[in-house]
Image (spheres, rainbow, N blue to C red):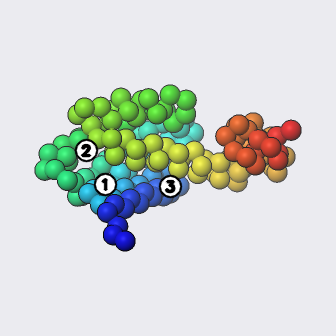
């Protein structure tokens, strides 16, 4: 057996001061290594800064797509975000892999926000809020909790 392709993606969310979270995400596969850093205002779920580094690419012109990453600034994480990401960095001057990584980073922020909110809520408040927000997206919150 010969491995012909491998891909790994990761996103880490770090809580900073003043309601800002830093997302450090990377995408590594057989042909690429891409790093993405986003800063998000967690209270508004709004991207306030974005940087990308195309460390390894299959073609010498691929790193030019990283200049498009600034277009992620101002995108609100929530409904419509996928379309906004694709428009910002997934178009002909962008990179499908950078768009994929940005989407994963957005999903990581959503998950992190649940943990951040959880710290400030009573168990009853958590149950009601999370059942409402996650019902229909997760087996547990749809069938077990939300009745």
Q: Front-most of 30 and 76?
A: 30
Query: Marks 1 and 2: in contact by CB < 8 Å?
Result: yes
SS assignment at label 2 = helix
Q: Which x, y percent locates residue 35?
A: 33, 55
Other residues around mark 3 within 10 Å, as few (<14) / some (14–19) / many (≥20): many
Checking the image for residue 34, the label placed there is 1
Rendered location of residue 97, percent (x, y): 34, 46
Q: Quadrant of the N terminus?
A: bottom left
Q: Which residue is labeled 2 in the image?
A: 66
Q: Earlier in the sequence, mark 2 or mark 1?
A: 1
Q: Earlier in the sequence, mark 1 or mark 3?
A: 3
How far apart are labels 2 and 1 at the CA level? 9 Å
Q: CA distance from mark 3 to mark 2?
A: 21 Å
Give the class, few, some or many, for how many residues have Cα within 10 Å of label 2's Cα (few <14, many ≥20): many
Q: Residue furthest left?
A: 60
Instruction: Kindly identify which residue carries mark 3.
Output: 13
In the picture shown, does residue 147 fall above or below 140?
A: above
- Count of labels in the image: 3
């Amino acid at each position: 057996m010969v491995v012909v392709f491998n891909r790994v993606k990761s996103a880490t969310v770090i809580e900073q001061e003043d309601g800002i979270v830093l997302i450090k995400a990377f995408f590594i596969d057989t042909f690429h290594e891409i790093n993405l850093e986003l800063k998000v205002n967690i209270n508004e779920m709004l991207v306030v800064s974005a940087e990308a580094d195309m460390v390894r690419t299959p073609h010498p012109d691929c790193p030019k797509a990283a200049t498009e990453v600034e277009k992620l600034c101002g995108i609100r994480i929530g409904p419509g975000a996928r379309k906004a990401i694709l428009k910002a960095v997934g178009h002909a001057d962008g990179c499908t892999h950078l768009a994929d990584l940005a989407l994963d980073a957005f999903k990581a922020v959503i998950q992190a926000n649940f943990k951040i909110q959880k710290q400030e809520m009573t168990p009853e408040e958590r149950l009601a809020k999370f059942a409402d927000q996650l019902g229909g997206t997760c087996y547990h919150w749809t069938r077990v909790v939300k009745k």
